[in-house]
Image (cartoon, grey):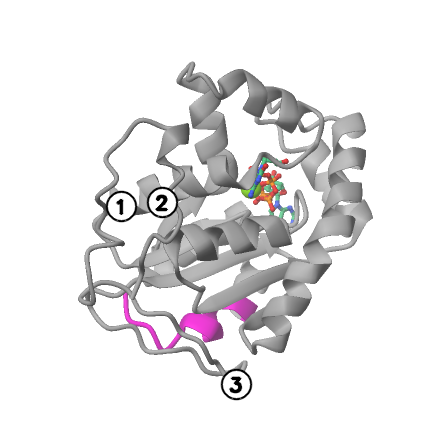
């Protein structure tokens, strides 16, 4: 069952009543997950949550688009939600912008609240949460606020040099896609990502994917993970 155990609604003005905290009919926590080759079978009405991890430029967003197409997931990108918040001119926009520009991680309550609102607004039960959790703080905030764990965690493992090359060629006009910010992002990624990876590895939820190769080659490594799910 998904339940909100800590309210962060003081950060944003919206209703406290959510589809995630309305009782036993909603969302299940998968406490154990024993085999890396098996995924839990989702039941209609329960969310199937996949966290998508990897450094900047490792190909998370690109692979998410392929997974959406093949398996009918809804893509929820933490970075996109934060950029949307900046563009909306919200009170938090300028703080989010300066945090991203500095290559740092936005406070977890802000990001989790945005993810939660987005999930609540979507009429699907299969979610890809891209670029989250980027730290143990992120991970714990999601658990505490939403009261759930992911079913599957993908980790796109990519050498730094390749990530830098891809980000510098990304051409999306992002404030963090410059060499100075990338260096900081990679340092922070190196410092904060591994505890999250270890956590999910120990819980048998982690699928580590070598992210070097063509987009299609990488997707062929992703596909079998979700093959048991129909679209
Ligand atoms: N396998 C790949 N090989 C080469 N370039 C790639 C590959 N996957 C993605 N890219 C490109 O690298 C850049 C970063 O990819 P993206 O999916 O945005 O990564 P992330 O979301 O992890 O930062 C994009 O310009 C994308 O088109
Ligand atoms: N969980 C998250 C996700 C993103 N952010 C911020 C900090 C990140 O550098 C930016 C951009 O994230 P995004 O996932 O879009 O970046 P990449 O696709 O990995 O290049 O957003 C965050 O603070 N916390
Ligand atoms: Mg991305």
Q: Secondary structure at mark 2?
A: helix
- Give the extent of the magenta segment: 221-231
- Residue 7: x %, y % from top left: 37, 43
Along the line of sight, the residue nearer the viewer: 141 or 226: 141
- Residue 92: x %, y % from top left: 48, 21
Q: Pointer 2: what residue?
A: 116
Magenta span contains residue 228:
yes
Residue 120's label in the rendered image is: 1
In the figure, 50 relative to 59: above or below? below
Q: Secondary structure at mark 3?
A: loop
Closer to viewer: mark 1 or mark 3: 1
Magenta span contains residue 103:
no
Q: In the rendered image, which quarter is residue 67 located in?
A: bottom left
Disc 2 vs disc 1: Cβ atoms closer than 8 Å? yes
Q: Residues within 10 Å of mark 1 (few under 14, many from 20)?
A: few
Q: CA distance from mark 1 to mark 3?
A: 30 Å
Along the line of sight, the residue nearer the viewer: 112 or 193: 112
- Residue at point 31%, 57% (across, down): 3
Of the residues under marks 2 and 3, which one precedes in the sequence? 3
Q: Is residue 192 visible?
A: yes
In the figure, 126 relative to 74: above or below? below
Q: In the rendered image, which quarter is residue 212 located in?
A: bottom right
Q: In the rendered view, does 99 fall on the left or right side of 132?
A: right
Quarter holding ligand 1: top right
Q: Pointer 3: what residue?
A: 35
- Residue at point 25%, 65% (across, down): 46
């Amino acid at each position: 069952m998904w339940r909100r155990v800590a309210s962060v609604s003081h950060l944003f003005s919206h209703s406290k009543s959510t589809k995630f905290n309305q009782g036993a009919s909603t969302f299940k926590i998968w406490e154990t997950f024993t085999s890396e080759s098996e995924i839990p079978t989702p039941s209609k009405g329960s969310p199937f949550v996949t966290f998508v991890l990897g450094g900047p430029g490792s190909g998370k967003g690109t692979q998410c688009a392929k997974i959406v197409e093949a398996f009918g997931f809804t893509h929820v990108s933490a970075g996109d939600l934060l950029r949307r918040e900046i563009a909306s001119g919200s009170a938090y926009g300028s703080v989010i912008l300066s945090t991203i520009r500095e290559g740092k991680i936005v406070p977890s309550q802000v990001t989790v609240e945005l993810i939660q609102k987005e999930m609540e607004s979507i009429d699907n039960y299969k979610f890809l949460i891209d670029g989250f959790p980027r730290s143990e703080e992120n991970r714990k905030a999601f658990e505490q606020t939403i009261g759930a764990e992911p079913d599957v965690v993908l980790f796109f493992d990519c050498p730094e040099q390749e990530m830098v090359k891809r980000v510098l060629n990304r051409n999306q006009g992002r404030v963090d896609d410059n060499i100075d910010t990338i260096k900081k992002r990679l340092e922070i990624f190196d410092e904060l990502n591994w505890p999250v990876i270890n956590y999910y590895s120990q819980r048998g939820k982690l699928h580590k994917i070598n992210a070097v190769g063509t987009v299609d080659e990488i997707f062929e490594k992703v596909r079998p993970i979700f093959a048991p799910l129909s679209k």
